[in-house]
Amino acid sequence: MYTPGVFLDALTGNRRGAYSGGVTGLTVGWDHDVELLLDFLNTRHVLDSEASWRAWVTERGLGRSSELAQARAARAALRSSIEGSSGPQTAAGVVHIELTDGVPVLSSSDALGAVLAASARLAVLGSWERFKICPADDCLRAFFDRSRNRSRTWCSMQVCGNREKARTFRKRTRDLQNSTLATV
């Protein structure tokens, strides 16, 4: 059974829930949830067929795969929530709460439940607002904003951000040239 959020404490070697205690900031366990959720949010082509969905689930060791239609609906609802769309969004999956070493841990026996459990943990921890969708029309990838003030806009400043800034610069230069020619 897949139980994200449980890891060995780096100092003591004890198995514990990544979210127990007064831990602040991102830790190894949280990064695992972040990466799982980002992988799922960016699965546009993976959800094209049942075979590619099963392969994605198997690669990540998430147990059995959920129904493809449920996975598509959950992905759409999660992305819509991140984009800030209003209106009801539902994503259904089975998530269990187990006591592991006296600590409640979210777990699931299927892939969609594992993704939803990771989403719930990140939301409870206040990290949900750090998930964003790249505004570039030809990209739209989900990313996790690790900046201190949560101001990151682009999935990659080297690709999408640079392209948009170059486009804005060319437009500004062209407009300036056109206004200069109009006054002459």
Image (spheres, rainbow, N blue to C red):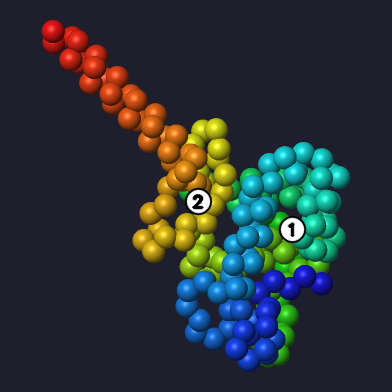
Q: Is residue 97 left or right of residue 166?
A: right
Which image quarter: residue 65?
A: bottom right
Q: Residue at x 56, y 49 (%)?
A: 142
Return the residue at label 2. 132
Q: What residue is pinned by disc 1?
A: 112
Quadrant containing the N terminus is: bottom right
Question: Please, is residue 73 above or below residue 144 in the view?
Answer: above
The nearer-to-camera label among 2 and 1 is 2
Q: Amino acid at mark 1?
A: Leu
Using the numbered discs, state the Cα–Cα distance from disc 2 to disc 1 in whole angstroms: 20 Å
Left or right of residue 118: residue 180: left
How dense is the environment of label 1, judged by Cα within 10 Å: few (below 14), some, or many (20 and up)? many
First in sequence, mark 2 or 1: give its number: 1
Residue sitting nearer the eye, 52 or 156: 156
Q: 78 or 164, which lies in front?
A: 164
Please state, as top left, top right, bottom left or bottom right, where the C terminus lies in the image: top left
In the figure, 26 relative to 10: above or below? above
Q: Is residue 86 visible?
A: no
Secondary structure, mark 1, is helix
Residue 42: % across, % down: 64, 47
